Image (spheres, helix red, strand yellow):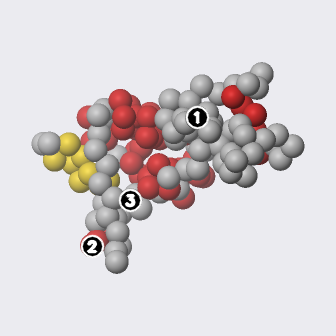
């Protein structure tokens, strides 16, 4: 996998490139990431326990499913869990104020700290896949 770039961190004069399978802990502890992009290092350190950071990939962190308390509690209506059932969070006492991923059908917050850091840095994410 190292040859494919999926597990590499490449720092250049123009920025930084993370392979999708770079572990959160590897990126957070990378010297140049800490020096040049401390918001990324901090977001990754604060996002999870050490055990999770050592196992979780950056791509997996970005691809977390948006969810809220209403999603987890099956007695409340949730369009993510059952499309068309409504969103109890819209009028709920514990209403979440979404920044990312909000729609007229759902206002659950996105939980990924790493993605927020990328947005703050005006980063560009390129996804590569196979066909």
Tag 2's secondary structure?
Answer: helix
| Number of on-image labels | 3
Which residue is rendered at x = 35% and y = 69% of the image? 129
Q: Which residue is mark 3?
A: 20
Quadrant for residue 41, please give it: top left
> Sequence order check: which comes first, mark 2 or mark 1?
2
Q: Nearer the viewer, mark 3 or mark 1?
A: 1
Q: Is residue 45 left or right of residue 79?
A: left
Measured as percent of width and height from the top left, residue 86 is found at 72, 40
> Sequence order check: which comes first, mark 2 or mark 3?
2
Measured as percent of width and height from the top left, residue 94 is found at 74, 24
Measured as percent of width and height from the top left, residue 97 is found at 60, 25
Which residue is rendered at x = 35% and y = 30% of the image? 120
Can residue 120 be seen here?
yes
Can residue 109 be seen here?
no
Check disc 2: other Cα within 10 Å, few if <14, some if 14-19, many if 20+.
few
Q: CA distance from mark 2 to mark 1?
A: 44 Å
Q: Which residue is mark 1?
A: 104
Q: Which mark is residue 3?
A: 2
Q: CA distance from mark 2 to mark 3?
A: 13 Å
């Amino acid at each position: 996998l190292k040859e494919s770039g999926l597990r590499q961190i490449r720092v250049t004069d123009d920025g930084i490139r993370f392979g999708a399978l770079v572990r959160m802990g590897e990126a957070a502890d990378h010297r140049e990431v800490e020096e040049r992009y401390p918001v990324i290092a901090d977001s990754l350190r604060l996002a999870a326990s050490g055990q999770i950071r050592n196992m979780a990939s950056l791509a997996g962190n970005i691809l977390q499913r948006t969810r809220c308390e209403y999603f987890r509690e099956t007695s409340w209506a949730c369009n993510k869990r059952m499309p068309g059932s409504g969103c109890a969070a819209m009028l709920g006492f514990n209403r979440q104020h979404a920044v990312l991923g909000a729609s007229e059908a759902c206002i659950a917050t996105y939980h990924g700290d790493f993605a927020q850091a990328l947005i703050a840095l005006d980063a560009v994410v390129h996804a590569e896949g196979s066909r």
